[in-house]
Each structure stands twice: as C-alpha cells, then as structure tokens.
Image (tube, helix red, strand yellow):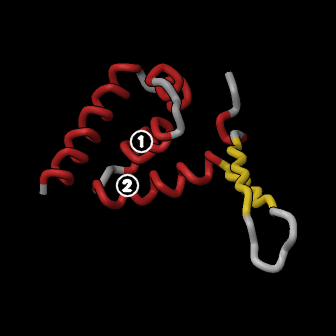
C-alpha cells in the first residue's frame, strides 16, 4: 500500500517580472495530504459530522478506497458505506439549505 501522506504536487509557473531581463520560475510544492486535511476539517465543521464520520471523510478525501478505510479503522466495508451514506445525506442537506 502506498503511504498517501507523502504525496506532493509540484507546480511551476513562468513569470515575467518588471526589472528582470530574463523570466523567472515560481515553484510551488504542495503536500496534498495536508491540503486535503485542511479542506476536510472545514467540511467536517460545515456538514456537522460526528467524530467517526470525520475520520472516514478525511480518509475518503485522501483517496482511500472503502476497503482501505475499513482496514485502517478496523471496521467492515458495510459500516464504511453506512457512514458514507450518512455523510452524503448531511452534505446534500447543507447544499439544499
């Protein structure tokens, strides 16, 4: 299994800055795990998820499969599905309101 907490995204932009004769490169390195963690924390609060739903949502947002979530949290896949159903219901209720 790949350690998904060590996935980075590298973005490079070419910049033309006044006062410089040659273009510059802006390199941004983003830890995908930390970015998604921050987003998931915001969503947990927004959708009013329970602590267990928050754990599952965090892993789901980090591209863990239902099977991987179940294994990591020592629960069955059916339990993951049930929590995900509840999470999607809460998300939908938030989006409709």
Mark sitting on residue 57: 1
Mark sitting on residue 43: 2
Can the viewer see residue 16? yes
Give the spatial CA distance, label 2 vs label 1.
9 Å
User: Dots 2 and 1: beta carbons under 8 Å?
Assistant: yes
Quarter of the picture containing the C terminus is: bottom left
In the depicted structure, whether residue 89 falls above or below residue 21: above
Badge 2: residue crowd in 10 Å (few <14, some 14–19, many ≥20): some
Residue farthest to the front, as pictured: 21
Mark nearer the N terminus (2 vs 1): 2
- Judge left or right: residue 17 versus residue 50: right
Residue 48: x and y in percent read 29, 56
Q: How many marks?
A: 2
Image point 43% across, 38% down: which residue? 56
Q: Secondary structure at mark 2?
A: helix
Residue 65: x and y in percent read 48, 24
């Amino acid at each position: 299994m790949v350690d998904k907490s060590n996935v980075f995204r590298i973005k490079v932009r070419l910049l033309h800055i006044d006062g410089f004769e040659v273009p510059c490169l802006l390199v941004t390195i983003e830890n995908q795990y930390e970015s998604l963690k921050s987003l998931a924390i915001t969503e947990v609060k927004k959708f009013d998820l329970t602590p267990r739903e928050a754990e599952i949502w965090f892993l789901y947002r980090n591209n863990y499969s239902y099977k991987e979530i179940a294994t990591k949290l020592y629960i069955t896949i059916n339990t993951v599905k049930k929590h995900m159903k509840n999470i999607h219901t809460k998300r939908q209720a938030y989006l409709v309101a």
